[in-house]
Image (tube, rainbow, N blue to C red):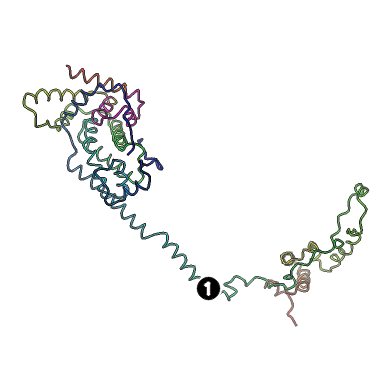
């Protein structure tokens, strides 16, 4: 499986090597204010609190991306755990060449693709319903509004689920993580124009489903 | 942090979809999944700390210090007066004659004879000058080497004049010893004994190998 390999000797974040190292190794490191790349480097230097902060930032978004891509809760759990295992394994050699988010999603995306290849049969309607049923509705909405919004959300979810793999991955990266075309291209390994085309088709299909 | 400015593109028409997507229920990993990931990260960090602690214990300076102590101990325990330890048991004693500094270059007249030029070239050769060595002058010197009765010595190449250094003398002695061994292997014991006696006579200070020394008659 191809993964965004950390590149040794890559350029460090602005501020210089010395200041970056000081920030990483300092016991009084500003973890809440630190960016993802600094946190990952700090964890590579043995700072477990930095990993906890990094995990807290990305756990929900990553899990949703995996769950809505695979449409299978068990597979999503496995891929989620494996993704973080690979992050942990790469802690010592990781260098901030690209955004941590892009690298993290690349790992998850490749694992999802591997799962498709190993198990080409897609999740059935029951599994999809079970996965979607775990997504509880918000509690602050009124009953009538809840019904209308619930139907809209259901249509959106089903429209996303019915998309082809490539279009679904592209639109999920766009909607869930607000990634740009270039970042989606980096994560999926597809050319920018291909990503643009996938997004256009996916958006068109979702709109048609919402109008139906 | 690495800056990744988002370039403008024509896909911003999905703003309403993004807003609608954010209203979807926010699925999250379960507590067991969180705990499993946290435990894996903690185990890895603990392993890193163990490795770092071991690296601190096995600092390269300790290896250097251990090497120095070991070397000093070997020097202290070694008795260099024992020739066996010093590796000098088989070394030949220093020949006083050979140990002398090399003499000044001999006059040109003592230079070795040049090989005679072919007759065709000899016609164009310049007339020999007074200081130059003449073939006739080199002739007795060549005879001097050939007059030696030792057959082994005849087989030895004539030493170059003025190059009577220790190294060449040792090399010559070694060559003669090698020749004696060859004679012994060929069964020519008498010739070998004669060559050995000649060698002892020519180089009385040379250290003979024990096996060859045993062939010589006991000294009176």
Element under disc 1: loop
Q: As drawn, is B104 to the left or to the right of A27?
A: right
Q: As drawn, is A209 to the left or to the right of B213?
A: left
Magenta segment, principal secondary structure? helix
The answer to which of B179 and A30 lies nearer the viewer is A30
Residue A74 in percent (x, y) is at 21, 36
* Residue drawn at the location 60% of the way across and 74% of the way down: B83
Question: Could you tell me which chain the residue with mark 1 belongs to?
Answer: B
- As drawn, A68 above or below A22: above
* Residue drawn at the location 37% of the way across and 42% of the way down: A12
The residue where tag 1 is placed is B78
The answer to which of A45 and B145 lies nearer the viewer is A45
Residue found farthest to the bottom: B220
Decide whether residue A186 is among the magenta residues. Answer: yes
The answer to which of B176 and B38 lies nearer the viewer is B38
Residue B163 in percent (x, y) is at 77, 63
Residue A75 in percent (x, y) is at 23, 35
The residue stretch that appears in magenta: A167-195
- As drawn, A144 above or below B109: above
Residue A141 sits in quarter: top left
The quarter of the picture where the N terminus of chain A appears is top left
Residue A182 sits in quarter: top left
Decide whether residue B145 is among the magenta residues. Answer: no
**Could you tell me if residue B185 is visible in this image?**
no
- As drawn, B74 above or below B32: below
Residue B54 in percent (x, y) is at 35, 58
**Could you tell me if residue A101 is visible in this image?**
yes
């Amino acid at each position: 499986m191809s993964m965004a390999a950390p590149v040794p000797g890559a350029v460090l974040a602005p501020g210089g090597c010395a200041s970056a190292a000081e920030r990483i190794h300092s016991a009084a490191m500003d973890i809440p204010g630190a960016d993802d790349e600094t946190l990952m480097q700090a964890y590579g230097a043995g700072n477990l609190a930095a990993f906890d902060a990094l995990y807290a930032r990305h756990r929900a978004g990553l899990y949703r991306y995996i769950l809505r891509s695979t449409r299978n809760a068990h597979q999503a759990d496995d891929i989620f755990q494996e993704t973080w295992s690979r992050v942990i394994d790469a802690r010592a050699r990781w260098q901030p060449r690209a955004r941590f988010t892009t690298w993290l999603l690349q790992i998850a995306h490749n694992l999802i693709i591997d799962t498709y290849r190993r198990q080409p049969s897609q999740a059935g309607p029951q599994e999809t319903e079970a996965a979607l049923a775990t997504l509880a509705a918000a509690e602050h909405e009124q009953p009538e509004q809840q019904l209308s919004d619930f139907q809209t959300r259901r249509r959106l979810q089903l429209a996303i689920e019915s998309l082809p793999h490539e279009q679904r991955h592209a639109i999920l990266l766009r909607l869930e993580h607000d990634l740009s075309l270039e970042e989606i291209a980096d994560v999926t390994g597809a050319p920018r124009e291909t990503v643009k085309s996938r997004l256009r088709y996916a958006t068109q299909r979702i709109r048609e489903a919402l109008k139906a | 942090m690495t800056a990744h400015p988002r370039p403008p593109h024509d896909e911003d028409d999905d703003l309403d979809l993004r807003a609608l997507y954010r209203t979807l229920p926010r699925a999250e990993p379960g507590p067991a999944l969180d705990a499993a990931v946290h435990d894996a990260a903690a185990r890895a960090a603990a392993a890193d700390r163990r490795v770092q602690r071991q690296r601190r214990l096995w600092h390269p300076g300790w290896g250097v210090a251990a090497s120095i102590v070991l070397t000093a101990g070997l020097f202290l325990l070694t008795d260099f007066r024992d020739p066996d330890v010093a590796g000098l048991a088989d070394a030949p004693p220093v020949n006083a004659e050979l140990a002398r500094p090399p003499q000044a270059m001999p006059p040109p007249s003592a230079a070795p004879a040049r090989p005679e030029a072919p007759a065709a070239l000899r016609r164009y050769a310049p007339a020999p000058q007074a200081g130059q060595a003449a073939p006739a002058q080199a002739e007795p010197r060549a005879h001097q080497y050939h007059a030696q009765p030792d057959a082994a010595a005849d087989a030895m190449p004539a030493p170059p004049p003025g190059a009577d250094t220790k190294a060449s003398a040792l090399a010559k002695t070694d060559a003669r010893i090698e020749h004696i061994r060859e004679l012994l292997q060929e069964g020519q014991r008498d010739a070998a004994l004669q060559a050995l006696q000649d060698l002892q006579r020519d180089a009385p200070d040379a250290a003979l190998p024990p096996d060859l020394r045993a062939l010589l008659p006991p000294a009176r």
